[in-house]
Amino acid sequence: MTTVISLDAMGGDHGPAVVVPAALEAIASHEQLELVLVGDREVLEGELARNSCTGHARLRVRHASEQVGMDELPSQALRNKKDSSMRVAINLVKEGQAAACVSAGNTGALMATGRFVLKTLAGIDRPAIAAPLPCINGHVHMLDLGANVESSAEQLQQFALMGAVLASAVDSIERPRVALLNIGQEEMKGNDRVKEAARLLAGSDINFVGYVEGDGIFKGLADVIVCDGFVGNVALKAGEGVAHMVGAFLRAEFQRTPLTRLAGLVALPVLRALRRRIDPREYNGASLLGLRGIVVKSHGGADQMAFRRAIEVALAAARKNVPQRIAAQVEHLLAHREAV
């Protein structure tokens, strides 16, 4: 069956200049994918023409007269921009005209609009932002990455459940290993909220493997790592910064002398493979879990390759019915609590 995904084509730092070519690339790679470009029709049709596309059976434009600024307050965007490309793209999901929505726009506005339009699933207090991060043996799903600065123990348990469902669905892992991010692996470490979340997880059906420290994020010790949004966002940005620093160090060392430049040429295939493994663009596309529909957040500065990757994240979530799976697991969790 064809999967329809709506794209906020005006969002992000680059807007249509990135979204349109990424969309064309995505539909060329996925025969059962249909995309809706949401935004200023004249601008989008002009960008399509620049990309030598005058019409495509699986690509259409939906006009929206407004757009949300990257620095706009979420409350203002929600109240005053009802015909924004972001709002219209999410409305298409609510109306059943699209299975998912992708936006590189203002994160706060996207979360607020998604929550207002789609609502949260029964039993979920707050949505969480989840994304894959590279690790030694592939990738790990981490959440929350910034939606909730503070979270209760019960909400951390909900995040764990949603992350486990996501990993199980998109990675085909029967019982994903779930860990809590903490300042130590010992049981006595951490604040009361994290300790209580550990107790709740240990008493649930989730495959809880205990605590991991910050360096454990990248060691492949778990399939899902759970934390509040403040800690998660700091860890995410720190990891991205380290990746850029390592890349800069390698370039500087290989350019130091004629001999090191020669060594760099010899090592070029290995360096390119390393870059692919840690390239943040390969992991672009964060899912807003806990909503009654699929919304994927692309990095605001995403290039064509990165935005196409976000489209593929949304496509995988739609094909695996992630919201429905989360709803079923939440129902099971609530039934288990009542039984206890």
Image (spheres, rainbow, N blue to C red):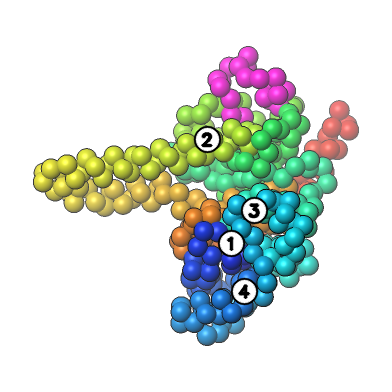
Is there CB contact under 8 Å for labels 1 and 4? no
Alpha carbons under labels 2 and 3: distance apart: 25 Å
- Classify mark 3: helix, strand or loop: loop
Is residue 276 among what the camera can see?
yes
The amino acid on which the numbered mark 2 sits, given as a three-letter code, is: Ala
Alpha carbons under labels 1 and 2: distance apart: 25 Å
Q: Position of residue 214 (x, y in %)?
A: 51, 29
Q: How many marks?
A: 4
Say which of marks 2 and 4 sits in front. 4
Residue under label 2: 235
- Name the residue nearer the viewer: 108 or 115: 108
The amino acid on which the numbered mark 3 sits, given as a three-letter code, is: Glu
- Name the residue nearer the viewer: 32 or 16: 16
Residue under label 4: 40
Q: Residue at x 84, y 38 (%)?
A: 334
> Tag 3 or tag 4, which sits nearer the N-term?
4
Q: Which mark is residue 11?
A: 1
The amino acid on which the numbered mark 4 sits, given as a three-letter code, is: Asp
The amino acid on which the numbered mark 1 sits, given as a three-letter code, is: Gly
> Tag 1 or tag 3, which sits nearer the N-term?
1
Q: Which mark is residue 72?
A: 3
Locate the C terminus and report the quarter of the image it occupies: top right
Q: Tell me where the magenta segment starts and ends, as one range.
A: 174-198
